[in-house]
Amino acid sequence: MEKNKNVLEIPYGTRDFLPNEAAGKRAIETKLAELFTEWGYDEVVTPTIEYLDNLTLGSSHSLEPHLFKLFDRNNRTLALRHEMTTPIARLVSSRLQDYPLPMKLSYISSVFRYEQTQTGRQCEFHQAGVELMGSTSAFADAEVIALAIRGMMCSGLKDFQLCLGQVEFINGIMEQYQLPPKMKEKLKDAMEKRDLVAFGDLIDHLALPENAKEVLKKLPLLNGGEDMLKDAYGFALNEQSRRALDNLCEIYHLLDAYGLTKYVRFDLGIIRDFNYYTGMVFEAYTRGLGFPLCGGGRYDHLLSDFGSACPATGFALGIERILLALERQNLKKPVRPKDIYLGYAQGKAGDAVKKAEELRCQGDVVEIALIPQTREAAAISQKDKGYKELVYLS
Amino acid sequence: MQLNHDEYLTIALPKGKLFGLSANLFEKIGYTAEGLSDKSRKLVIANEEKKIKFIVSKTADVPTYVEYGAADIGVIGKDVLLESGKDVYELLDLGFGRCHLMMAVPKTEKRAKLTDYNHTRVATKFPHIAERFFNRHGMQMEYIKLNGSIELGPIVGLSESIVDIVETGTTLKENNLEEIVAIQEATARLIANRVSFKLKFDRINEMVTDLHRILEREAVAQ
């Protein structure tokens, strides 16, 4: 092939997956697809483009600048999906209305967001996740969290931490001091921007007793194990915030039954950037990655925005982020190894084809030479292409 | 890519006027390292016993080191932080390095209202902050990014106004400029990487609590 000197550009924030990169991505996706199936989750596929109105229905206005938009023939605004929870909520509340609940759905899809790109943060990226529809129980939340942890484990990650919070705790604490809605929004905004200085300043200017201010200021710092959760009961003066903590305790005990609590830590200051969450929320982090690997939570009102009320909980894992974390931590991707390169002498093509079929039946990965080779030439091809073993028919 | 080692806490400090003040403050809570100086040729200075590493970097690069997780913690002026737009935790107002960001014009060219400057040129080191400010006032400006001696802009006819930080106002006076509107107050901030803040929470939180105590004590003493 003549070498082409011009490498053609691809759009901002997109990438090609070259063979070994694509193999890593496919391997992780296959593992996750198997895992979701084993847990009884059915895969769904939704369109890449949706009507803009449907995507922005449950979310804040801050979402719109991040969407890729286009027009259809009738000038209706379309957008590329920015996540999968909203399209699946649309699907369940319309086309799957009559299916028996609870419904367990999974997906592995590309999603699109305008972002300032960095490694691990592209405009087009891939997510694998599940949505569990039709249950308000802590049991459902625990299942979703356990599945997220199992997903990270089966992708090959060893060292990660999942932080678990509850938006109703924050809401309850703000309610118990009767903060006006505008102020609640401002405080949440500061937390979402991770600006604890502005958060503290807002609280300093409230007309509240000092101890109430102290409690509010602690909100983003309530991070720890079971002891911290016990302490948090000391701040919870109303039913709403106490119930949120009870819910976390219940989820934690169930995760104990799964044997997964060593990965879990409480973080009552978590605010996810999608504002449709209504209950437990979580994010998972790992060493060497500047942003979360995975995030999720309960969203009980999103489906009613689409016309049929149904509680739901779920998570999404970032495939590229998992790949990046594995690479940075020098961990193996769950890729199938290349087993056998099959070479053959002149006149042995028919035998070689039969041999290759036989080996593949046994479960080996086999590449067959396209032309007859000498044993030496075949050995070189085997090495160049990275096969573990040479089988040669002479 | 070599990532910061798990057991170390890496702190990025900016060269220049914030360096001494930050190093001083950290020393008070026992966070220091031998040979820590912004004149040092060594760029990474470690305290093996306490498992701390200091990175001394150019001011504008501190938020970048922290956002990418190359440093867990950093000290940076709010002005630089706002301009960078980086996604990091802002944990503590350190109170020092106070300055304020404002718009100034030549005394002889003052106009009646802020909006009278609409569609004019503004020289600044902070084009993002300036743009956000003017957009809020419904104004469209032409931003001319300069890297130093911003006051020169109006003098040589490069721009009608400047947006810059002032500490005492002497430079403005010497160049016959006058502040017409304040944009933002700024002090030094303690920032943290969003994942480090979660994965090393106990250590970072202890540090923040200690720093907070020192700052309060000093505020009372003044």
Image: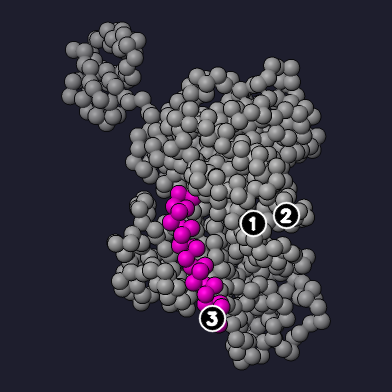
Q: Does the residue at mark 3 contact the one at mark 2 (Cβ under 8 Å)? A: no
Q: Amino acid at mark 2?
A: Tyr
Disc marking residue B221:
3
Q: Amino acid at mark 1?
A: Leu
B112 displayed left or right of A311: right
- Residue A348 on image: x %, y %: 25, 10
**Residue in view at x 52 percent, y 47 percent:** A228
B206 drawn magenta: yes
Instruction: Magenta stretch: give its range.
Output: B198-222
- Figure colour scheme: one colour
Chain letter of the residue carrying label 1: A
B197 drawn magenta: no
Q: CA distance from mark 3 to mark 2?
A: 33 Å
Nearest the camera: A99 or A327? A99
* Callout 2: SS: loop
Q: Does the residue at mark 2 contact the one at mark 1 (Cβ under 8 Å)? A: yes
Q: Which residue is mark 1?
A: A216
Q: Which residue is mark 2?
A: A177
Q: CA distance from mark 2 to mark 1?
A: 9 Å
Overall secondary structure of the magenta section: helix
- Residue B51 on image: x %, y %: 33, 59
**Residue in view at x 59 percent, y 27 percent:** A139
